[in-house]
């Protein structure tokens, strides 16, 4: 009877909160770039940046929650986006699951965004275990970096990086981000070299150009963070980011297949497509 009523136009079934256009965009983007999953947060163009960031964090919390399971090693980078996501993550129970940092910490201590705080908080919400890092993400020289990486206190973290099930990362865009928690670790020479080598963004503090190629090897050797190549090897690698300043970086990461899942908003996803000369969606 229901099928007949639908056929005759007497009955119409709508799923509350289901946006068919948004779903079509998610499916198109996923197939175009051969991604595992795409999740687009619902926000309006008239919303403030704060409201858009809040919507992204809410969507990311729901998305990430579906990937947390028993007997996993889950790595997380840091920053305001991931901090907001973890704030909105609902408590759950993941037996024998460990959370670890994917990069060293910021230069000046902001406990809200510090990688150890984020790792502790997500582990607490999931009743899991946590591992911490006691080093800043960028060191003065390669010798210091190697000393840290080869030390006994870092041995466990390196082991976890080799067996990650899930990597949850933020993406940095412009080099002049004023609210950055760590960019002051870079010298004037670093900025000059990054500009010279056409940096468009970073992930786990690993800078790359518009093709997704890691750049400025000297800085790479001073960085304590999972490499882009290693992120690409993780079975589920999730990038959470939005905003015009991150469009080029996200496109480069997707093309290079560093990540296989993305959580963003409609404006950013459309901008990525347009940057790639695809105007299927307006």
Image (tube, helix red, strand yellow):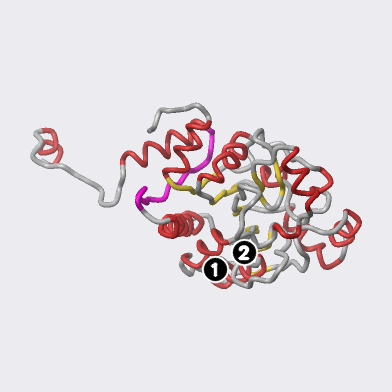
Q: Residue placed at 50% from the left, 68% from the top?
A: 87
Give the residue at mark 1.
126
Q: Position of residue 254 (x, y in %)?
A: 58, 38
| Viewer-nearest residue: 31 or 44 | 44
Q: Is mark 1 on a helix, strand or loop?
A: loop
Q: Position of residue 77 (x, y in %)?
A: 64, 58
Residue 45 to residue 25: above or below: below
Name the outermost residue toward the right: 143
Q: Position of residue 134 (x, y in %)?
A: 77, 69
| Viewer-nearest residue: 12 or 44 | 44
First-in-chain label (1 vs 2): 2
Quarter of the image with the N terminus is top left
Q: Residue 69 carries which label?
A: none
Magenta part of the chain:
33-46
Q: What element carries label 2?
A: loop
Q: Does 15 sit left or right of 89 as displayed?
A: left
Question: Decide: marks 1, 2 in contact (CB < 8 A)?
Answer: yes
Q: Distance between the residues labelled 1 and 2?
A: 8 Å
Task: Say few, some or many: other residues with alpha carbon within 10 Å of mark 2 (under 14 / 14 to 19 / 20 or more).
Answer: some
Majority SS type along the magenta span: loop
Q: Does 173 sit left or right of 14 as displayed?
A: right
Q: Where is residue 55 in the image (x, y as percent from the top left)?
A: 41, 57
Give the residue at mark 2.
97
Q: Does the magenta stretch include residue 34?
A: yes
| Viewer-nearest residue: 171 or 101 | 171
Residue 134 to residue 22: above or below: below
Quarter of the image with the C terminus is top left
Location of residue 261 (image quadrant): top right
Q: Residue placed at 13% from the left, 33% from the top?
A: 7
Nearer to us: label 1 or label 2: 1
Q: Does the magenta stretch include residue 124?
A: no
């Amino acid at each position: 009877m229901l099928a007949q009523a639908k056929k005759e136009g007497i009955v119409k079934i709508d799923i509350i909160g289901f946006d068919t256009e948004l779903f079509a965009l998610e499916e198109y983007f996923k197939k175009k770039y051969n991604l595992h999953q795409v999740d687009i947060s619902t926000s309006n163009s008239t919303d403030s940046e704060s409201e858009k960031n809040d919507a992204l964090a809410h969507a990311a919390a729901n998305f990430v929650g579906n990937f947390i399971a028993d007997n996993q090693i889950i790595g997380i980078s840091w920053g305001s986006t991931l901090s907001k996501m973890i704030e909105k993550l609902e408590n759950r129970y993941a037996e024998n699951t460990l959370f670890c940092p994917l990069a060293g910490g910021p230069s000046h201590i902001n406990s809200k965004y510090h990688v150890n705080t984020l790792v502790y908080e997500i582990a607490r919400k999931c009743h899991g275990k946590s591992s911490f890092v006691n080093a800043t993400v960028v060191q003065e020289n390669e010798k210091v970096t190697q000393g840290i990486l080869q030390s006994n206190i870092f041995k466990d973290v390196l082991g976890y990086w080799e067996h990650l099930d899930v990597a949850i990362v933020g993406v940095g865009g412009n080099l002049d981000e004023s609210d950055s928690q760590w960019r002051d670790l870079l010298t004037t020479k670093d900025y000059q070299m990054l500009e010279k080598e056409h940096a468009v963004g970073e992930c786990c503090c690993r800078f790359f150009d518009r093709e997704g190629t890691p750049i400025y090897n000297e800085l790479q050797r001073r960085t304590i963070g999972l490499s882009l190549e290693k992120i690409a090897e993780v079975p589920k690698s999730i990038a959470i980011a939005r905003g015009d300043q991150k469009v080029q970086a996200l496109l480069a990461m997707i093309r290079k297949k560093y990540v296989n899942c993305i959580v963003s908003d409609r404006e950013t996803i459309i901008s990525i497509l347009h940057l790639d000369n695809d105007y299927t969606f307006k």
